[in-house]
Image (cartoon, grey):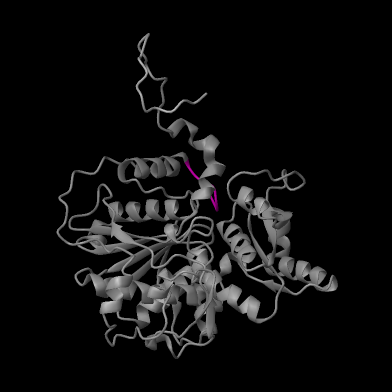
Amino acid sequence: MLLRPALPVAVSSTPPLFSHLAAVRRRCSIAATGMAGVSAASPAAAQIGSFLSKKPFAPPSWASHLALAPSHTFSLGHFPTPIHKWNLPNLPEGTEVWIKRDDLSGMQLSGNKVRKLEFLLSDAVAQGADCVITVGGIQSNHCRATAVAAKYLNLDCYLILRTSKLLVDQDPGLVGNLLVERLLGAHIDLVSKEEYGKIGSVALADLLKNNLLEEGRKPYVIPVGGSNSLGTWGYIEAVRELEQQIQLSGDVQFDDIVVACGSGGTIAGLALGSKLSSLTAKVHAFSVCDDPEYFYDYVQGLIDGLQSGLDSHDIVSIQNAKGLGYAMNTAEELKFVKDIATATGIVLDPVYSGKGAYAMLKDMADNPSKWKGRKVLFVHTGGLLGLYDKVDQMSSLAGSWRRMDLEESVPRKDGTGKMF
C-alpha cells in the first residue's frame, strides 16, 4: 500500500481526550449510564501505593448480569490509556481515525494483555497459586507480560514457547520479548511448531502443570493470550473506561472500533461491552492468525462462558488479515509500519496492530463508502518489542544516518561536559 504524507491539518478546537483526568473526575459525578462501581479508571490510580495493589471490583450496571465477575483484581496497568486523533493519510471523505493507546498501559507490561492479567492473576492468587504457566509464540507479548506481572506478585512463571523445528534445540537468544523474560528468570520450555500443532496448547500446559504438581508446586494455567471468559472482563472494563473518557470529553462519539485479533479475548470484551453499554459502536476485528470463522466460534465460547445470551456474529465483524501467517510479514506490510511511523509518530508492532491498521486502511481504500464520514477508534494493543525480531527485514527501510561534518577546528564552548 502506497502512503503519501498526510496534508497539514488545522488544529481542532476540541480538546484531546487526555487520560489523566483524576481531578476532573473528582468534580464530575458519573451519570446514570451504567458506569457505577469501581473502575480501572478510578482516581485511586494516582494514589501512592495503589499500583500493584489488590482492589475491589464491581461490574458496570450494564454488565452486572454477566457471569464470572470477580470481587477483586490487581492494579497492574496505567489506566486510563490516552485517546488522540490519528492523522492517517488517504482516508475516505469525512472519515476521522482516533487511536486508543493501550500500548501505553505500561513499559514492561505494555499492551492489551495487562487488562486481562489484572483479572487472571487475581484469580491465581485467590486460589493459592505459587506459579503460573502460559503458552505462546517465541516472541509472545502475552508471555512477556505474564512473566513481568507474575514477578510483581512474587509468583514463578513457566513459559511454553513455540518456535521452528530448526531452532527448538538451540538457545533462543535474547531478542525482544525473550530478553525481558530471561532477565526476569522465567522458566522457558521450547516446543516446535509441529509439536504444538499435534499436541495443542491445552495439553502442553496440562503436561507441565502435572509435572509441577508432582514437585509440590501450586500452578495456575493462563491460556494463550489470556483469552478465556474471565480474561474477557479486562476489555469489558476497558469499555467502561472508554465510556468515561467520552463522557468527560462531551463531544466525541465513535461509530466504529477497530482492533487486531490474535487470541479472541480482546475482541470478545470490546464487542460485548460495546453491545451492552452506551457506546453502541460497531466493532471490527482483523484476525492475524486463524480464519474469521474460527474466531467467531471462539468468541462465542467466551461470551457463552459469561452467560451473555448473545451471538458473536451479531456483535463483531471479523475479517482476515493474517497475510503470510502469524508473525510473518510481507515487505509491503513492514514498509507500511515504517511509513506510518514516519508520517504520524505512531510505532506499530508488525504482528498485531501493524497488520490490523494495514488491513483497515486497505479496506477503507477498497470500500470508501463503508467508512465515509465515520469516526473510527483504533485500539493500539502494543507489542513494540516484537519489532526487534524484524531487524534484519527492516534494515533497508530504516532512516538514513551520516557522520557529522565538522570543520577542522571547532572551538570548545564553556558549559559542555567532557566525555573523557
Furthest-right residue in this view: 214
Does 24 sit above or below residue 12?
A: below
Is residue 35 located in the magenta-colored stretch of the structure?
no
Q: Quadrant of residue 160?
A: bottom right
In the rendered image, residue 21, in percent from the top left (x then y), is placed at 31, 69
Which residue is at 40% across, 41% downward? Answer: 338
Which residue is at 42% across, 50% downward? Answer: 348
Does 84 sit above or below residue 124?
A: above
Does 155 sit above or below residue 97?
A: below
Q: Is residue 279 visible?
A: no
Furthest-front residue in this view: 414
Furthest-top residue in this view: 408
Report the front residue among 389 and 185: 185
Q: Is residue 350 visible?
A: yes
In the rendered image, residue 362, in percent from the top left (x then y), is placed at 34, 51
Q: Quadrant of residue 316?
A: bottom left
Which residue is at 43% across, 74% downward? Answer: 40
Q: Quadrant of the N terminus?
A: top left
Q: Which residues are magenta?
A: 324-330
Is residue 325 located in the magenta-colored stretch of the structure?
yes
Left or right of 377 in this view: 321: right
Count of labels in the image: 0
In the rendered image, residue 81, in percent from the top left (x then y), is placed at 38, 64
Left or right of 124 in this view: 351: left
In the rendered image, residue 204, in percent from the top left (x then y), is placed at 73, 65
Which residue is at 22% across, 54% downward? Answer: 92
Label the magenta part by its dominant secondary structure.
loop
